Each structure stands twice: as structure tokens, then as C-alpha cells.
Image: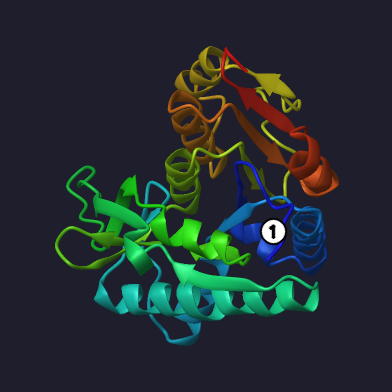
Amino acid sequence: MSATRVGRPIVVKLGGSLLEDAGQRATALAAIAARWTAGQRIVVVHGGGKRIDASLQALKIPKKTYRGLRITDPETLDVVVSILSGLVNKSLVAEFRSLGVTSAGLSGADGETLWAEFHPRLDGVDFGFVGRVTFSNPKLIRAILGADLLPIVASVALGREGTLLNVNADSAASALAIALGAERLVFLTDVEGLLDAEGKLVRELDADAAWTMLSSGAVGGGMRPKLVACLEAVKAGVSQVVIAGPNGHASALAEGIGGTRLASAAA
């Protein structure tokens, strides 16, 4: 066990689009491996939407979405769980080993790490087995870190009704960062960072500015839930959140600077 691995962990969320690009994936994993080897405590959270889409297509299961959310019937849930907790998760375990990092792959359902409630209907649409993360129990993650293993968490959660739920990986990462009292929450993505209404990179903003951007409609697509997750983390006491593209992966992990930095007023 490393005698120098002390202090609060960094929670790192790996974007699904990034994971599908071999070059960007390699850059992100190498940056994480370098910080881990240097003694930083790290927890990785991932999704895998594009891999799920490909599997659904191969199985001839229709992809159904509404307002950016995947409608998850029982057949789709089986694919989501097997791809996220199986193929994507274990592929990351193997790739980190090739970089000299021993890890433990799990889903948010293991050890009750992530709890979620069923997502409410929108405009009468039932999303099925889609959840909203409500709570994170960090006990298992802390035990894995205590064994000097890198935890890699797939974005699958437990529902109170004894079911597995498909949850947003950004929200899962935010919940874990809050529960662990993380030093930093880092979103490694395939884009430069948060862009304003004119398409220019926003390098730093506070919570008030972030809410203004959300309410004005200047933030859309996958960046919207990511920014909401950032705000939830900052509100709960995570002092620093960074959204960084490939050119900023290493600096975001090492120094807390990257494409876009969101910090609390006290940070």
C-alpha cells in the first residue's frame, strides 16, 4: 500500500463520447494514471451511452428518448447494466492495468454506493427504469481506496423498490464527490469546456453566473446536466469543479485548472 496516498480524493467523471475516441481516451487514462502513481487518491465514474446505442442497434432494440433522457424499459435496462457494469467497466480496469494501475470495477449498486428514485414523468412520458441520484454511501469506495486500489464506478444505481436504475453519470459523479468530501470534481470530456452564447470558452465562473447561463438557455445538450451537477457539488461544499477537454486533462487533475473552472465563493 502506498504510504504517500493521503488527503481527500479527486472524483473524475469520464465522458462517454471521450471513451469512444481512442486518442482522447488514451490521453485521459494516462493523465489519471500519472496522478494516481504520484500518490493522489482518485475515484473514476463513467457512463457509456454510445456503446449502449451500438448494442441496442445490434440487438434490434429501438432506442427511445425524450428530452435527452433514454426511455429504459426492462429489455433496454438489461443492455444498459451489462454494457456499463460489464464491458465498459472491465475494459477500463484492463486498460488501467496496462498503465500500471490496479483498480476495482463496480457499479453504483454495489455496496449501496448510489441510491436513486424513479424519474418523474415529463409531459406524461414514463421513462421506465431511469433514476435520479438521491444519495451516495461512500463506505465501499473508501474501503477500495484503503486497499490502494483505484475505484471505477459505472453509473447504475439502486432504487428503493429493489430495482436497478439507469442514472446520469454526471449526477453520479457529483453525488460521490459530495459523499466523499472530495478535494475536486473533474469532468474529462471531448470538448474544450463550457461555451457561452457566442461560442467562446468560459474559463471561470461562479454559481450565480452558472445559474444565469442555465436560465438564459445559453447552455444546452449534454453540457446542461453536467453544469447542474457541477452546481450541486459546489453547493454541497466541493470547493472546486473543472470541466476539461483533452488538452487540459493533465492540468485539471494536477492543478485544478482546465477548460472551465467553477468554484464556490469561499474557494
Residue beneath the point at 46% across and 74% down: 85
Residue beneath the point at 43% across and 52% down: 168
Residue 52, position as x, y percentages in the image: 49, 72
Q: Is residue 15 left or right of residue 116?
A: right
| Type of the residue with mark 1 | Leu
Image: 172 above or below 46: above
How many tags in the picture? 1
Residue at the front extreme, as displayed: 3
Residue 109 seen in the current view: no
Mark 1 secondary-structure assignment: helix
Residue 161 quadrant: bottom left
Q: Is residue 25 left or right of residue 74?
A: right
Residue 155, position as x, y percentages in the image: 45, 61
Image: 216 above or below 255: above
Q: Is residue 250 left or right of residue 239?
A: right
Q: Which quadrant holds the N terminus?
A: bottom right
Residue 213, position as x, y percentages in the image: 54, 20
To which residue does mark 1 refer?
18
Judge by depth and name the residue closer to the eye, 28 or 267: 267
Q: Residues within 10 Å of mark 1 (few under 14, many from 20)?
A: many
Residue 30 quadrant: bottom right
Residue beneath the point at 59% across and 57% down: 44
Residue beneath the point at 37% across and 58% down: 113
Residue at the left extreme, as displayed: 161
Residue 194, position as x, y percentages in the image: 67, 32
